[in-house]
Image: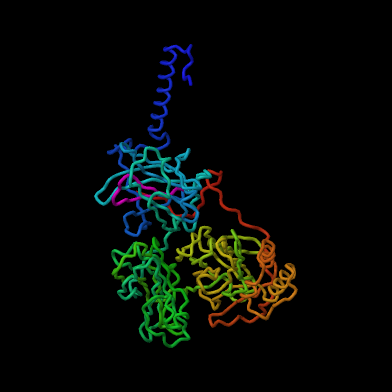
Amino acid sequence: MRVFNKNLRLQDVTIMYFTALAALMVILVASYQAPTNAVEISSLPSNPSSPLPRLPMPFHVPLDPQGDLQLAWNISYANQEVYMELRVKELRHGVVLGMSDRGELTNADLVVLWDSGSKSYFGDAWSDSEGHVSLDNKQNYELMEAKQKPDGFYLLFKRPFSTCDPRDYLIEEGTVHIIYGLLDQPLISLEQLNLSSIHTGVQRVLMLRPDMLSSTLPPDVETLDVVAPNVIIPNQETTYWCFIQELPENMPKNHIVMYESVITPGNEAIVHHMEVFECSPDMSHVPQYSGSCDDKMKPGKLNFCRHVLAAWAMGAEAFYYPPDAGLPMGGPGSSRFLRLEVHYHNPLLISGRRDSSGIRLHYTPSLRRYDAGIMELGLVYTPIMAVPPKQDTFYLSGYCTSKCTKTALPPGGIFIFASQLHTHLAGRGVRTVLVRGGREVEVVQEDQHFSTHYQTIRVLHKMANVLPGDVLITKCTYNTEDRSKPTVGGFGIMEEMCVNYIHYYPRTKLELCKSNVDPEYLQKYFNFINRFHGNDRCVCGEVSVTEQYSQLHWDAFAGEVLDSLYNTAPISMHCNQSTARLFPGEWEKQPVPVVTSILEKPRYPCEGGAPPTGRPSEPTA
């Protein structure tokens, strides 16, 4: 075979050779060029003429189990920006920090610090559906400082809440899933990076926080530590530890005015969240117990210690009650027994680590003007409410009706100042809205990135005044794509709940305001779906509701009809007093509250909206 044409001259061959060589050099040089959108770290002035004033970083959380990565932040509501400070104890070749819908490594909004072997770069990036990383065309993370200090390498940067970039994460109220990773080798190009190839982790935080309430405590304040009794943390990834603590006998009524976490030094990255529950006042005695909450041999009375007094999750600050209110503890009608529940997250399977973490209650005998109360909103714990299998998104709503609030609330209503949202493993979002005259007037609390692994009491940006005749609707979002059977309501972790524990004052006798679909209408649904699928024999009433759900042929039609039933059929209202008895009145077959006007979501400045008012002040030096 002849490679060259016999008429091809040596000059032509030479030109072709050098042209090809030049093209190859262009390609090679381009692949080694500095990224055009990234910031070269060495270009930052090491000693600026006007040093950056030190911003307070009131919120902070360890990201990894060892505590080698620490994230701190502050919020400017005036500028709609979040200031973040990332500390890396030992930086090798770079670090990745990002946010995604549920903590996935795919389709994530990222900020990356990396080195090419000779220079270091900082840039706004994103990952695709397979985890491949690319620099973003629009750089929305602004690097303010990069500095090595004695305790680690610090990055200070900021980012708007919303950038209107479809590849960027919208920072909004509720849970934010933070992903992180460390680079252990240089990258010639950021496009070489796939997040699946590096060690990564997930941490959850409440990034947007409201103004803190008054931090002034009364001079006669006393403290009570409800802490684990020097337990040895099991060398397993997840442990829920329960401990019963007894209050002093004949303890008079006091007001809890503040509580805070007490974490054993060195365990800050293992103690994930904690709750203190009051046991039922009807029980004169609760056995001593310190052990796994999941132990089948634990005393059965622990199951009656469900009234939340305090809740803390990693990254949460001290919780202060409003100046005019305090949560009663002690005195007539209260229990002498408290249950502490500590969630240990120990993915490194550390052995022999001892822990005495818990919650410190600050209380005063000088009673404030109002008793604070805790009320349950949402759905009753019953298998009557269920989520079909294989659902990407399915909604359930629980109602606190106008009839109940008109019956149970005082003329001036109540003021909600905090709440704790709750679902089990299939829960993806929770929203409680206040409805007045058929119109949504205020979102009490909302978290569309909710995780059952991150539950804490959340202070409202603005107190919600609920008047007699108002309606409170709590709507939960579920995902059951990984389940082949229906998920019914109940107490088990594989069953579901839809709850908002609202903290309010003044305390009333109304302790539970929840609903479920009318059981008779549910039986009509079972009968209809069975007949539709050719099963003329109805077992309605012969087996349990859970079994009836399981026996259904689940297809898209069955799910759509169930959704319609829940949104239109009459409901059974549970308008319960603190004695667990219903308020006087007719509560069966009540109509579903009608909502004629829905609140619009706020618009951000990049969308032409105005920054909200009445928010915390911006960071100051």
> How are the residues colored?
rainbow
Check the image and name the residue furthest to the left. 150
Vertical arrangement, residue 297 with respect to residue 353, above or below: below
Residue sitting at x 54%, y 78% = 509
The image quadrant that residue 512 belongs to is bottom right
Nearer-the-camera pick, 515 or 64: 64
Nearer-the-camera pick, 501 or 130: 130
The magenta span reads 79-96
Q: Position of residue 515 (x, y in %)?
A: 61, 73
In screen coordinates, is 536 left or right of 305?
A: right
The image quadrant that residue 209 belongs to is bottom left
The image quadrant that residue 474 belongs to is bottom right
Residue 26 lies within the magenta run = no
Q: Is residue 410 visible?
A: no
Nearer-the-camera pick, 342 or 416: 342
Residue sitting at x 53%, y 62% = 445
Is most of the magenta stretch helix, strand or loop?
Answer: strand
Q: Position of residue 74 (x, y in %)?
A: 40, 52
Q: Position of residue 473 (x, y in %)?
A: 60, 66
- Image label count: 0
Nearer-the-camera pick, 427 or 77: 427
Residue 85 lies within the magenta run = yes
In screen coordinates, is 569 left or right of 197?
A: right
